[in-house]
Image (cartoon, coloured by chain):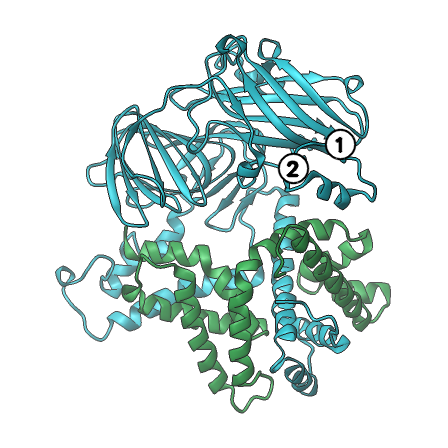
């Protein structure tokens, strides 16, 4: 197969996994996208070194880690970043948690179905069109802070539900 | 790995602030203090941010499904930005990489052309993006819910006959799902049940069967460009033939009905050519040699403890445990089997909810199980609320082609609420599933002498807590 096409195929398929990892390390969407872009450039540059008998994602994650560190160095004077030590610890925990993520993702639908209509509406507003939740807050005359608090409770409830589902399905590590 | 039982209440607040992008410097320092050196808190962080990403993805999928638009929909803003970034980045990288030392095209390996040539060459990354929009196959037969995720982040919850598809993934969402695709050269592939198949066609046709069953009727392919079929355990090279492939996590079974197929076992790169009427199993613990397709048998009995990874339903190791999970008292005390398969719902394209269980039959090491006019099907299970039940078989022809679904219904009056049931069904009473009536002329009138792909049992509309503990096919004349 054409190596370019093979790269695009693998990257298209697994980009979300790498993106998730980068977002864990750099939880600001704009920064994460920038680093993700750098990751893709470096993966492409090193593509001829990729051992096709090995899985793509771990290889890509290693590059992502290096790019995160590079980004961290660039942001040394910027205080809104985690320390190197914490980044290393989070990266290690991420690798432990990664095998469970698909199952957690699978449990989400069931847990979302358990939310009441109002909670579902907040989730849709928050994760739907950009700015929709702010508009809703203004329309209803409630503070954005109050809606964020409601969302915090919803996410906590969802995490608890996902954890229970995972345990019920036999994921003792969940 | 255990979740902390004494989680700091501030942690979730700070995590919420971080995903909302409103965290202050002081709060970030506080978060770092809570996380650094505390694996449980770090796990919570990873799970919380993972949930945030999943919710973004969920909402995008929900919106796509709601609109049912055939237009392209972004999975998320970040995905879109990422995809655009990658396309731009690859071109940028290519320019950076190749500008300093121009070489003659003949000195380069495939794909390493000059920046100018890369822009014009059809196989450049940008053109590949465009190529993905070019249809490579058309849906020609379809029954049951089948979803489609295109490479260009297009999602269709339900496909329709006549839909043209570019590269992407089709997934049968229910045991009753059946899809046949025709490629531009007339080759056809079909999937049955809960199968997942990715298709692409750049230089050559390339399929990835993630799980399930695929039947292929492939026209002769260009020399040196066989159709490639990838599974987790094997790579198949098809030049022009009829065959079927079945794959799950640990094995791939290739059965060739006409022509021949080269099979490569990925674990050791062993390679064999499988001739017509032979099969090979790519698995770590099996001899990787072609063997004649086993003789058909007429008897089969479920073994739920072995089938749990392949069956459709919520598998429970112990019926008693399952009962405790669904209600406080224990209605299944009298159930003798240790394993049960609980019906789970899916929605048809008509928005009917079906609660179903299904067990594959002629799969893996099993020989093909064939039905006779005298065959009987015995089903044991449990119903919390008595309800009309549908019992059925999905069958295929010996050459692998889908041959229909046949079913029989039993009225609610034949079942007791909160009781175990056992029914013995005569195959001669089974009729073609009404949802397949438009293919009535094409499909056989009855399931006799056909191979059983799966047996299933379902209720409609409402959850009635249906569980199956055993299914059996038997042919009395054989004994």
Mark 2 neighbour density, 10 Å: few (under 14) some (14–19) many (20 or more): some
Query: In the rendered image of this protein, does residue B215 appear above or below residue A170?
Result: above
Dot 2: what SS? loop
Question: What's the residue at 58%, 9% (across, down)?
Answer: B428
Q: Quadrant of residue B251?
A: top left
Of the pair B461 and B115, the residue shown nearer to us: B461
Would residue A21 appear left or right of B123 to someone viewing this image? right
The colour assigned to chain B within the rendered structure: cyan
Residue B111 occupies which quadrant of the picture?
bottom left
- Residue B31 in sight here: yes
Which residue is pictured at 51% across the width and 70% down the height? A22
Circle 1 chain: B
Percent x, y of residue B74: 55, 55
Q: Nearer the viewer, residue B227 or B307?
A: B307
Residue on which the image places disc 2:
B338
> Residue A61, located in which quarter of the rendered image?
bottom left
């Amino acid at each position: 197969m054409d190596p370019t096409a093979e790269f695009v195929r693998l990257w298209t398929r697994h980009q979300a996994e790498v993106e998730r990892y980068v977002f864990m390390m750099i939880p600001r969407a704009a920064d994460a996208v920038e680093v993700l872009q750098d990751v893709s450039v470096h993966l492409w540059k090193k593509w001829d070194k990729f051992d096709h008998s090995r899985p793509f994602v771990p290889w890509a994650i290693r590059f992502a880690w290096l790019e995160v560190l590079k980004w961290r160095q660039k942001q040394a004077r910027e205080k809104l970043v985690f320390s190197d030590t914490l980044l290393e610890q989070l990266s290690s925990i991420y690798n432990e948690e990664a095998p469970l993520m698909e199952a957690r993702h699978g449990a989400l639908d069931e847990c979302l179905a358990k939310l009441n209509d109002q909670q579902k509406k907040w989730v849709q507003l928050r994760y739907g069109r950009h700015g929709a939740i702010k508009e809703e807050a203004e329309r209803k005359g409630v503070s954005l802070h109050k809606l964020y608090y409601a969302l915090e409770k919803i996410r906590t409830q969802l995490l608890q539900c996902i954890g229970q589902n995972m345990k019920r399905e036999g994921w003792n590590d969940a | 790995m255990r979740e902390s039982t004494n989680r700091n209440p501030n942690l979730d607040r700070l995590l919420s602030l971080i995903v909302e992008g409103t965290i202050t410097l002081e709060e970030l320092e506080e978060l770092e203090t809570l996380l650094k050196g505390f694996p449980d808190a770090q796990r919570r962080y990873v799970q919380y941010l993972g949930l945030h990403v999943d919710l973004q993805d969920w909402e995008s999928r929900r919106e796509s499904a709601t609109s049912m638009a055939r237009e392209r929909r972004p999975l998320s803003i970040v995905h879109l930005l990422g995809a655009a970034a990658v396309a731009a980045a690859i071109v940028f990288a290519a320019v950076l990489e190749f500008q300093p030392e121009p070489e003659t095209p003949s000195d380069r390996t495939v794909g390493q052309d000059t920046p100018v040539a890369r822009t014009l060459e059809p196989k450049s990354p940008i053109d590949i993006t465009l190529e993905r929009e070019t249809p490579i196959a058309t849906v020609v037969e379809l029954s049951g819910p089948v979803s489609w995720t295109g490479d260009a982040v297009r999602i269709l919850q339900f496909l329709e006959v006549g839909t043209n598809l570019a590269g992407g993934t089709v997934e049968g969402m229910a045991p009753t799902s059946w899809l046949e695709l025709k490629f531009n050269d007339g080759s056809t592939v079909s999937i049955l049940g809960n199968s997942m198949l990715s298709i692409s066609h750049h230089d050559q046709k390339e399929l990835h069967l993630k799980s399930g069953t695929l039947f292929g009727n492939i026209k002769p392919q260009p020399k040196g460009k066989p159709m490639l079929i990838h599974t987790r355990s094997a790579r198949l090279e098809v030049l022009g033939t009829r065959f079927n492939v079945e794959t799950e996590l640990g094995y791939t079974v290739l059965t060739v009905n006409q022509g021949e197929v080269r099979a490569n076992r990925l674990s050791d790169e062993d390679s064999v050519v499988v001739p017509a009427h032979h099969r090979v199993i790519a698995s770590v613990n099996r001899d990787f040699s072609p063997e004649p397709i086993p003789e058909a048998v007429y008897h089969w009995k479920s073994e739920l403890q072995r089938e749990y990874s392949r069956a459709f339903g919520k598998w429970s190791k112990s019926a008693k445990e399952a009962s405790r999970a669904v209600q406080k008292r224990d209605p299944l005390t009298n159930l003798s089997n240790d394993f049960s398969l609980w019906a789970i719902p899916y929605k048809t394209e008509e928005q009917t909810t079906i609660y179903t269980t299904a067990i594959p039959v002629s799969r893996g090491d099993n020989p093909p199980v064939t039905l006779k006019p005298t065959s009987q099907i015995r089903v044991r299970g449990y119903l919390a609320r008595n309800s009309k039940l549908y019992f059925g078989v999905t069958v295929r022809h010996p050459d692998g082609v889908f041959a229909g679904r046949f079913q029989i219904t039993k009225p609610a009056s034949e079942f007791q609420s909160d009781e175990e049931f056992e029914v013995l069904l005569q195959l001669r009473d089974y009729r073609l599933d009404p949802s397949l009536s438009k293919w009535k002329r094409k499909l056989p009138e009855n399931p006799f002498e056909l191979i059983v792909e799966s047996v299933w049992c379902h209720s409609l509309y409402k959850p009635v807590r249906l569980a199956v503990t055993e299914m059996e096919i038997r042919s009395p004349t054989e004994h």
